[in-house]
Amino acid sequence: MAAPSPGPREVLAPSPEAGCRAVTSSRRGLLWRLRDKQSRLGLFEISPGHELHGMTCMMQAGLWAATQVSMDHPPTGPPSQDDFSEVLTQVHEGFELGTLAGPAFAWLRRSLGLAEDDYQAALGPGGPYLQFLSTSKSKASFFLSHDQRFFLKTQGRREVQALLAHLPRYVQHLQRHPHSLLARLLGVHSLRVDRGKKTYFIVMQSVFYPAGRISERYDIKGCEVSRWVDPAPEGSPIVLVLKDLNFQGKTIKLGPQRNWFLRQMELDTTFLRELNVLDYSLLMAFQCLHEDERGLGSSLIFRTARSVQGAQSPEESGVQNRRLLPDAPNALHILDGPEQRYFLGVVDLATVYGLRKRLEHLWKTLRYPGRTFSTVSPARYARRLCQWVEEHTE
């Protein structure tokens, strides 16, 4: 499915330096910097001399200027068809940054309660990006904002087209299910240096935030082929995201929240199946609850009103999440069980089951007889992942 024909605009970008300087001086005190650096265990700061330093500096300057446009022209209502197809190109010294469907994403960020000045400060030049060394087989580069709240990933042109084509329905799904497990996509951009080839990248909320006490991270697809990662040596600072086979013998203990989680997985995977999408992952992380955090659900009500408002009928209100959560910035991805806090989110929503994937399915059927692998039909993929979740939760 092709992306809508965009309406291009090209403007000269403002400089981020003055605004960035003001935000940095007001927010980065000594105590904040020490605590921030300590929480970066296993991540690599992209400092001068790093091979990606030049690229990330351009991304930061470009995103600062792109966000300034949405701050100067805030959305006045739900996105229109033109908003979904707009392409804004801002010309900087030595590079151009394109913002795809900018007004639609600005409206989505506002609907999530995300302040544009916070978004700009986190992604702009106020602090270096952090490199995340992924265990994914893709050739994508992965970054985190300096506060680790936002995740950036390079994408191929075909995947970007799929994301933009599905964007209106994605926005509708999040409106209907405010506590959907789908990752919150916040922006799609292109970067072109000296009139060269464009590099596309996306910005999304990090599922693993706040990361300070997270002990284990997993990427689950519900299959077995290529789903093992050698764990890091004991005491190593490397942060690894493990896979399905590493999870054998473990259980997600949700208690009363299990029924909601199973139902929301069914709703979200059904939506992705309708988009003809596969190869997405359920990200999970574990964090042990402190003694004083257990049982707080009896007194902390989080976003209940919004959940009810998102329901379409009295019958459907029961499937909306009425979780009792800590008041954290990315709390949509957090679910408390009796003993542990779980970070949960469905990511990688851009792989369409077209001819290429159908041929890959045929080849893997011959290559791995009797084994489960990721490239199957969207219906089978959704059903299998939901079955995995049901078998590994209690």
Image (spheres, rainbow, N blue to C red):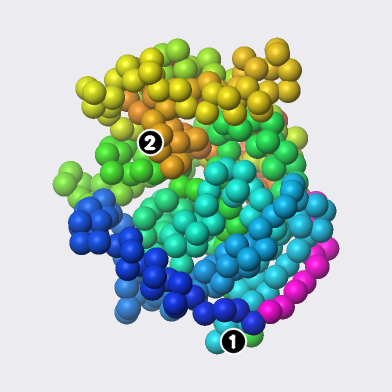
User: In the image shown, does 258 or 276 lie closer to the viewer?
Assistant: 258
Q: Secondary structure at mark 2?
A: strand
Look at 50% across and 35% down and name the residue there: 332
**Mark 2 to mark 1: distance in Å?**
40 Å
Q: Is 366 one of the magenta-colored residues?
A: no
Location of the C terminus (image quadrant): top left
User: In the image shown, does 294 or 283 lie closer to the viewer?
Assistant: 294
Q: Position of residue 188 (x, y in %)?
A: 62, 60
Q: Position of residue 373 (x, y in %)?
A: 56, 37
For the question of whether residue 229 can be seen, the reply is no
Q: Is 5 one of the magenta-colored residues?
A: yes
User: In the image shown, does 77 or 12 lie closer to the viewer?
Assistant: 77
Q: Relative to residue 327, is residue 51 depicted above or below?
A: below
Please give the range of residues in magenta.
Answer: 1-11
Look at 25% across and 61% down and name the residue there: 29
Q: Which residue is mark 2?
A: 285
User: In the image shown, does 391 or 257 lie closer to the viewer?
Assistant: 257
Q: Which residue is mark 1?
A: 194
